[in-house]
Amino acid sequence: MAFIITIEGEHAALASEDEIADGIAAAREVFARNEADPLACQLAVTKLEQDELLNREEALLCLIWDEAEEAAFRAVTLGWLSRAVDIKLAVRAESGEEVVAARLTH
């Protein structure tokens, strides 16, 4: 399934187009390196946030999501004086289904 990765959050508008592109590329690299479906990762994170029990695979998907989001955050904010910003990774199906976003605030 095709998917779209975006950078969202309160401070996402402060990032340039190049910074956003770098962040998305960093996240894609993490998902590709781990051969993980970003949508499956995001669904696992949503399940975790709702205090639902995770199986081993879902727990691993959450770890991959965290790594991808951290890579995206660092790529977007590289050179910024402050990293106390709200920027998060979001993934949605290319078909236009509702975005389910997980939040990582630094």
Image (spheres, grey):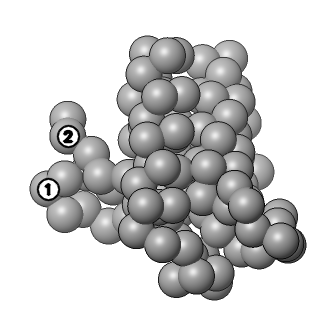
Q: Residue at the spot x=24%, y=62% of the render?
A: 97
Residue 61 in the image: x percent, y percent? 59, 28
Amino acid type indicated by mark 2: Ala
Disc 2 and disc 1 in contact, CB within 8 angstroms: yes
Helix, strand or loop status at disc 1: loop
Q: Residue at the spot x=60%, y=18% of the render?
A: 57
User: Looking at the rendering, in which quadrant would you find the N terminus?
Assistant: top left
Amino acid type indicated by mark 1: Ser
Q: Which residue is mark 1?
A: 95
Q: Is residue 86 left or right of residue 58?
A: right
Q: Within the image, what quadrant is residue 66 found in?
A: top right
Q: Classify 10 Å Cα crowding around label 2: few (below 14), some (14-19), many (20 and above).
A: few
Residue placed most toward the observer, 26 or 61? 26
Q: Which residue is mark 2?
A: 2
Residue 95 in the image: x percent, y percent? 14, 56
Seen in the picture, residue 68 relative to 57 is either above or below; the reply is below
